[in-house]
Amino acid sequence: MTSSAEEYDVIVLGAGPTGENVADRTVAAGLSTVIVEAELVGGECSYWACMPSKALLRPAAALDDARAVAGSREAVGERKLDAAAVLARRDSFTSHWKDDGQVEWLRDTGIELVRGHGRLSGVRTVTVETEDGSERVLTARHAVAVCTGSRPVLPSGVPGLAEAHPWTNREATGSPAVPGRLAVVGGGVVGVEMAAAWQALGSQVTLLVRGDGLLPRMEPFAGELVAEGLREAGVDLRFGVEVSALERADGSGPVTLALGDGQRLVADEVLYATGRAPRTADIGLEQVGLRPGDWLAVDDSCTVAGVDGGWLYAAGDVNHRALLTHQGKYQARITGAAIAARAEGRALDTSRWGAHAASADVAGAPQVVFTRPEVAAVGLTLEAARRAGLRVRAVDHEIGAVAGASLYADGYRGRARVIFDQDREVIVGACLVGPGVAELLHSATVAVVGEVPIDRLWHAVPAYPTISEVWLRLLEGCRG
């Protein structure tokens, strides 16, 4: 082993979207920055999550849209997706799992890349085991930012699980072929999206859910409408079911799932979409007094708690504030600004909505589930708002009753809800379900994060005839 010591202003562990954005912000502030990555530059989102999954889902949504309108419906007929073309398009969006373009962006931006596995080895110090087996010791004058993301979690204690070689999100978004039969375990975002995608591509999908509904962190009607849509698409959806054991002979061929109700299910592949854990088990947390494998607790500036000196930051999934790519990028902007301010000797503004506070993680994190139909949500659910002690009421409206929705699709079905804070007269949450609602979400996010009074929102006029006219009906309900 050979080693060398190198000094930078900032070291970033992890070159996913979060790490890239931290580095971009610190370089823009004039701070020399190095980013350490053991896998592909661009991270989970680019190659195994957001981009490939949406590339798989979009063709099915486009075909559904064509079938929902008289005229185009007849032109499409009973045609099915061209699975090979969909998979090829997916591959193009992942750059065929090559990161040349991302590496070029780092270079053009002035960010240095070190390929290898980085571990904290002391105060503002990272030791990297590089691809050729050598060791590089990096020291930071100002900050180290941990942006190592999260990994899928498989349940423990299930006989035969390891031997069955289950899919996680990586195999589900990257499979080179369509399985004839796919069992999906889990009713969260990954489970419902991948069930929708592979059913549309020709798999016979069985979705197994331990609880009694889908998307449990959203409004109940969202999961109900998604369950209805998946069943209409042909998914075999089963609630209240647990997998007690799996069997796959010689690690190949069909996999047999033994279910808690005594039934057996045979599939060609099984996807476990049962949660995430932080990628912190082997990054040297013990060297700075933290426990390996833990989520990293941070304050609103993304400074890690329990580490003296305010030099260690954690942004993105790894801090467990909001496991969403766009929130990780948002936190990265906050983190980069905080690092730059401290490097210049300036005090941080961590007031609510201050320049160095990731307040939107709690108050206004938007999310879209690109399933059948789409679900878009921001802010608090009705239940969460009540738990927080707010005096709120829900205002609901059927989106299909709006003229723009009836033009968008014959027989449009969907529902919108806003959570109205009656004391402050602002909207603190929204949930929209239906075709095309993803593009309505940012208006809801602006209303929630901006805490725009209802009396002012009344003067934000939606264009006619668009689906966004649902806002008129919702605001009428708020005004009472």
Image (cartoon, rainbow, N blue to C red):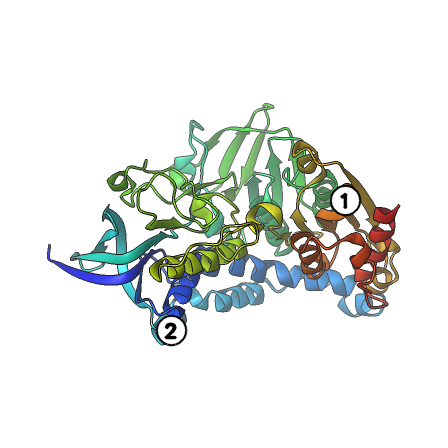
Q: Secondary structure at mark 2?
A: helix
Q: Position of residue 363 (x, y in %)?
A: 61, 47
**Which residue is under mark 1?**
420
Q: Which residue is mark 2?
A: 109
Q: Residues within 10 Å of mark 1 (few under 14, many from 20)?
A: many
Q: Residue at x 54, y 68 (%)?
A: 89
Position of the C terminus by quadrant: top right
At label 1, the amino acid type is Phe
x and y, in percent, of residue 223 in the image: 70, 41
Q: CA distance from mark 1 to mark 2?
A: 44 Å
Tag 1 and tag 2, C-beta contact below 8 Å: no
Does residue 284 appear left or right of residue 409 in this picture? left
- Where residue 249 sits, quadrant-wise, is top left
Q: Quadrant of residue 463?
A: bottom right
Given the current orientation, which residue lies at the most extreme bottom position?
A: 108
Number of callouts: 2
Amino acid type for the residue under numbered disc 2: Thr
**Image quadrant for the N terminus?**
bottom left
* Foreground disc of the pair 1, 2: 1
Task: Report x, y in % for residue 125.
Answer: 23, 52
Q: Left of 227 or right of it: where is 361?
A: left
Residue displayed at 81% across by 52% down: 413
- Answer left or right for 430 relative to 354: right
Quick one: 38 or 194, which is closer to the camera?
A: 38
Measured as percent of width and height from the top left, residue 470 is found at: 82, 56
Nearer the N terminus, badge 1 or badge 2?
Answer: 2
Residue 240 in the image: above or below residue 17: above
Tell me the element at label 1.
Answer: strand
